[in-house]
Image (spheres, rainbow, N blue to C red):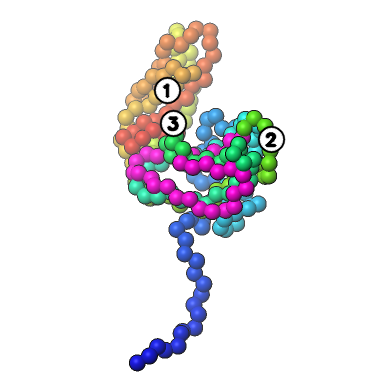
Amino acid sequence: IGVGPWSLQSNSATPSSLNDNFPPGSIPTGWVQPAGSNAPWIVATDTTYSGAQSLKSGFVENAQKSDIAYTAVFSSGTVSFARRVSSEGNYDLLSFYIDGVLQGSWSGEVVWSTVSYPLTAGVRTLLWRYVKDSSVSVGSDAAWIDSVSLPALSGALPSAPTIGTALAGNASASVTFTPGTIGSGTLVNYTADCGGVTATGSASPITVTSLTIGTSYTCKVKTTSSIGTSA
């Protein structure tokens, strides 16, 4: 009884829990630049963790930020991603948030490496932010993420309605819109917002009251379902 010789070598295999197909050649569907961000993230080829492309923070001046966010209905699991930073240490930061709660921050010269965070089931907003302080630029003055791996989706959020017109009335505006998709939930209501003054309804149009006469307003509409709210 003994041990026979080894077989011929197989092809090489590199274990990975991350997503080698991220990003898919463009900003992924549903990933958006949130309000308040000064510059959108872009697809980049100057440095990557895996594959030919990564996502890179947009160019920002001092005291500005570049955000990218993704909101979805997730199953419980783990969010993992690779990140790289080239910035002024301790001052210009890449930060990652889940539902507005800071999970981690990195600054200085950070080579590509991976991080993972638990994600509980439900509607969750993931946000990556590169933010600069009031002075000094060091290195590439940017951050990158790559190979993002997310838990499976457990439902679809509603999409935002397509805005129509806002017809002015007596201290009011009648806001028309075309509904978007409801997703995997059931409709709760639509909310029209004119300069921070809101009203809800189950169909178009929605009349927003208590507006200031002589003031110009722009209006928007969002959808709320039993799953969550449109972006």
Q: From the viewer's perspective, is the residue at label 3 or at label 1 nearer?
A: 1
Residue 122 is one of the magenta-drawn residues? yes
Q: Position of residue 29 (x, y in %)?
A: 49, 44
Query: Of helix, strand and loop, which mostly describes the magenta segment?
Result: strand
User: As rendered, which of 121 and 2 lies closer to the eye?
Assistant: 2
Q: Which mark is residue 97?
A: none
Q: CA distance from mark 2 to mark 3?
A: 42 Å
Estimate how packed mark 1 is, as few (under 14), some (14 to 19) or many (20 or more) residues with alpha carbons within 10 Å.
Answer: many
Q: From the viewer's perspective, is the residue at label 2 or at label 3 nearer?
A: 2
Which mark sits nearer the N-terminus, 3 or 1? 3
Estimate how packed mark 2 is, as few (under 14), some (14 to 19) or many (20 or more) residues with alpha carbons within 10 Å.
Answer: few
Query: Is label 2 in contact with label 3 (beta carbons under 8 Å)?
Result: no
Secondary structure type for disc 2: loop
What residue would you read off at disc 2?
Answer: 136
Range drawn in magenta: 103-132
At 41% from the left and 19% from the top, the residue drawn is: 198
Secondary structure type for disc 3: loop
Which mark sits nearer the N-terminus, 2 or 3? 2
At 42% from the left and 29% from the top, the residue drawn is: 222
Is 203 on the left or on the right of 128, as rendered? left
Q: Position of residue 183 (x, y in %)?
A: 36, 40
Q: From the viewer's perspective, is the residue at label 2 or at label 1 nearer?
A: 2
Instruction: Give the amino acid at mark 2.
Output: Val
Residue 41 visible in the current orientation? no
Secondary structure type for disc 1: strand
Instruction: Give the amino acid at mark 3.
Output: Pro
